[in-house]
Amino acid sequence: MPETRTAATGTRTAAVRGSAPSRPAAATKRQPSPARRLIVVAVLVAVAATCFLSLFVKGSFEFAIERRLILLGAITVAAFAQGVGTVVFQTVTHNRILTPSLMGFDAVYTLMQTLMVFVFGGSVLATTDGLPKLLTQTLLMVAFTTLLFRWLFSGPTGSLHVLLLAGVVLGIAFQSLSVFLQRLLSPADYDVLSTRLFGRLSTVEATHLPLAFAVCAVCAVVLWRRRHRLDVLLLGRDTARGLGLDHRRELTTALIVVAVLVSFSTALVGPMTFFGFTAALLAYQFAGTHQHAFVLPMAFLLGLLTLLTGQFVMEHVLYASGMLTVVIEFLGGAVFLTHLLRRGSL
Amino acid sequence: MRRLALPAAVLVTLALVAASLMTGGYDIDVNTLLHDPEARRMFLVSRVPRTLALVLAAAAMAVSGVIMQMLVQNRFVEPTTTGTSEWAALGVLLLTLLAPGAPILVKMACAAVFAFAGTLLFLTLLNRIALRSQVIVPIVGIMLGAVVGAVTLYIASATDLMQTLSAWRSGGFSSVVRGHYEPLWVVGVIVVVLYVAADRFTIAGLGRSVATSLGLHYKRVLFLGLAMVALATGVTSIVVGFLPFLGLVVPNLVSAVRGDDVRSNLPWTVLAAIVLLIVCDLVGRTVVAPLEIPASVVLGAVGAVLFLTMTLRRRALKGAVHA
Amino acid sequence: MIEFHDLVKSYGDHTVLGPVSGRIERGGVTSLIGPNGAGKSTLLTLLGRLTDPTSGTVTLDGVDVHKAPSAEVARKLAILRQENHFTARVTVRELVAFGRFPHSRGRLTSEDLGHVDRALDFLDLTALSGRYLDQLSGGQRQRAYVAMVLAQDTDYVLLDEPLNNLDIKHGVRMMERLRAAADDLGKTVVLIVHDINIAAGYSDRVMALRDGKVEAHGTPEELMEPETLSGIFDTPVRVHVVDGRPLAVHHR
């Protein structure tokens, strides 16, 4: 432990071990270009989406297609928000193991749901479902994180790590409150609540999807215009400032976009802590470049592919379609752990 | 004056202990204690164990925090920020599934073993990760805890044990009666061991190479430290649930006031933890009486505020922990 | 010309630099020397507007660097810090290309690519340009960082210990390159150097700091006096003339 920490005052890259230098530069050149990789993955996603929509239809074709289209829409939103949100979050926080839900989004969401059930009873969740609630919850989560940013960046030195820590600590405080309230609920109310505490892709309302797509599209435009600036952010605060980037402004903008994406996705389909992490990790592995112009679409597509394949397998092979998000979280957690143990560098 | 400080602190603590003993559902006061055998019985069965559990649990968590902070050489670690508590929860959940009727001592052992394995995993991770900032260490630990928590949640939801789990996690001291809290006495032993071995933990915290060159059996000390933390966490979490932030806030506050000598700080740390926990418990018991907010919830809120203030003040004083 | 007035940097009650005032003339190589903790890096990051001063101002050709748009400053001044941590795996060429960001905002033109190639060539990195940074030795990586800063093609170049991790051969070559950047390309180079003889041998001016104050500022000949150096470093230093140049000796 401490010896590696003191040794790590050099560059991060110094922590990468052994095998790397022997890798010949020529081998990297033979690999397919980032654009080609993106096309391959896009084709795979198209195939997966077609299979997902058209195979194993029982009963009315129209009904099945309609239901599946809605589910596909929800999956698309979740994949975009979590995958892209996590990549941007990891870029601006300068590490590759954190996920945005760490900032307390999940905890705020859980507390809101628990409070509603606690105050109004279990039936309230179903009766209030609708656009207003979706928007209110999103706004509350965005407000929470924005307040946190403002508060912590107004100090003498805006430290990102302290910001993260504050988010995490408040998350724990909210969680302990939620856990306590949950204990007071009647078992029936609790059952209603517990279905909301996991991601629930299959129960998304079709009427919410246009708005969801619009939010994603706006965020996509904002991020696309910033793709080169995000690349520069990868170099760290000082180098980015040296290259003339308004570091604080870019950081705040990026974090707010992340807050919007993750809050909206959480309000729409429920919390997904490790899914975004998985999508981002896969994207770094397969994108073949550090450039956000390729990594961001890659994270979205790979997230989509993961969810589509997962849903397909759960529905037609394992006959447990409702468990998809839980299983993905579980696997994502496992991937996270193995990743840390195999090659940990922050 | 300085010499009187510690006795004064002891007196304050004792006063709070007395207040805790005198607070509760039944009408018990000094008068009834002297004359009413039924009141005396209730006092011994319920009030005394509860207060003792508070005292012991506070000591346990504070001491666990101190040990971890020495071993990791980081001020921000304690069982909640290293995933240790989450591992204990997973252990208990698995045991509940596999052997629902297991006696309490088996449960504690199981929780302690899982806590041990989890803390070891955390230390292994720290070994492999090149860390640049003190603040990132607890974030990694909490992330690790979140992974384990997700697994626990998954299992609990698949087996309909969710509410049992959350009931147990927020614990509370209200269910502590005679015959239930006694294993907490093991904490006393841990405090003594820590007091004797404090220097070794400090040296071990400097790393394997430094420790070995100073002639210390690194692995043995590390093992001892981890075992103590795991035991304290396991036992406490079974008896009273999780106590977030106690091990974090108290040692840091004490060393902010008194400097960094672990050994001479230890009595202060233990006393301060007891005071904080008893106050949280009293608040939880009195503000919404006859209902009761578990001490862990009050502590979660108070601890979070204290911790954040501490971190931000440290930042203002010491300049930047640059992002 | 870089001018700084009453510059102070403190954390809480602890002042690490200042108040200092002074100027660095346009053109040539200026070395900052001084013992550990003298405030050299703090001064350099303040001049390069990476840190905000507690009080005081820094102007670059009359423009306040802390008030001017950062992107504008980046086209006139480049700064390299001692420690660099990158999250992503990038190749040497990609890293150097980042130096063009202030001009291209990420869309590289053929002119940008020309600057990148020249910077790579200037530091003998052409053969390594396809390698990832984590495949390089410490010295090669150090040269790649300097190449990035040179690709930025600014009038002013600030470097915090560019000789870090370099062996004798590469250290000397780096100093010759920086000298050439000043002489042939007309750049103003400011760097922190630990070795006083290297500083004296390659600089036009030397600025010595001690305890957060500017202790001396002048030509190498002016500073290379036993009393001056002994005072700055708090250690007896003798100065001999070898091959017509002053050489400081501070050990047996």
Image (cartoon, coloured by chain):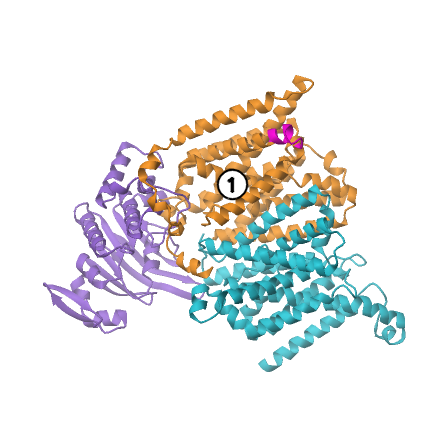
Chain colours: A orange, B cyan, C purple
Front one among B283 and A153: B283
Residue at x 50% of width, y 36% of height: A84
Q: Amino acid at mark 1?
A: Thr
As helix, strand or loop, the secondary structure at mark 1 comes to: helix
- Per the picture, the main secondary structure of the magenta-coloured stretch is helix
Front one among C56 and A45: A45
Up-down relation of residue C163 to residue B224 (above or below)? above
Quarter of the picture holding the C terminus of chain C: bottom left
Residue at x 50% of width, y 63% of height: B73
Up-down relation of residue C162 to residue A187 (above or below)? below
Graded by Cα atoms within 10 Å as few (under 14), some (14 to 19) or many (20 or more), the crowding at tag 1 reads many
Which chain is mark 1 on? A
Relative image position of residue A266 (x, y in whole percent)? 61, 38
Specify whether residue B240 is in view: no
Q: Quarter of the image holding residue B69?
A: bottom right
Residue at x 69% of width, y 41% of height: B158
Residue range of the region highlighted in magenta in the rendering: A311-320
Describe residue A92's horizontal placement relative to residue A112 as left or right.
Answer: left
Specify whether residue B181 is in view: yes
Relative image position of residue C14 (x, y in whole percent)? 42, 66
Dot 1 corresponds to which residue?
A86
Residue at x 33% of width, y 68% of height: C211
Relative image position of residue C157 (x, y in whole percent)? 27, 49
Relative image position of residue B29 (x, y in whole percent)? 84, 72
As for residue B220 lying within the magenta part, the answer is no
Up-down relation of residue C24 to residue A280 (above or below)? below
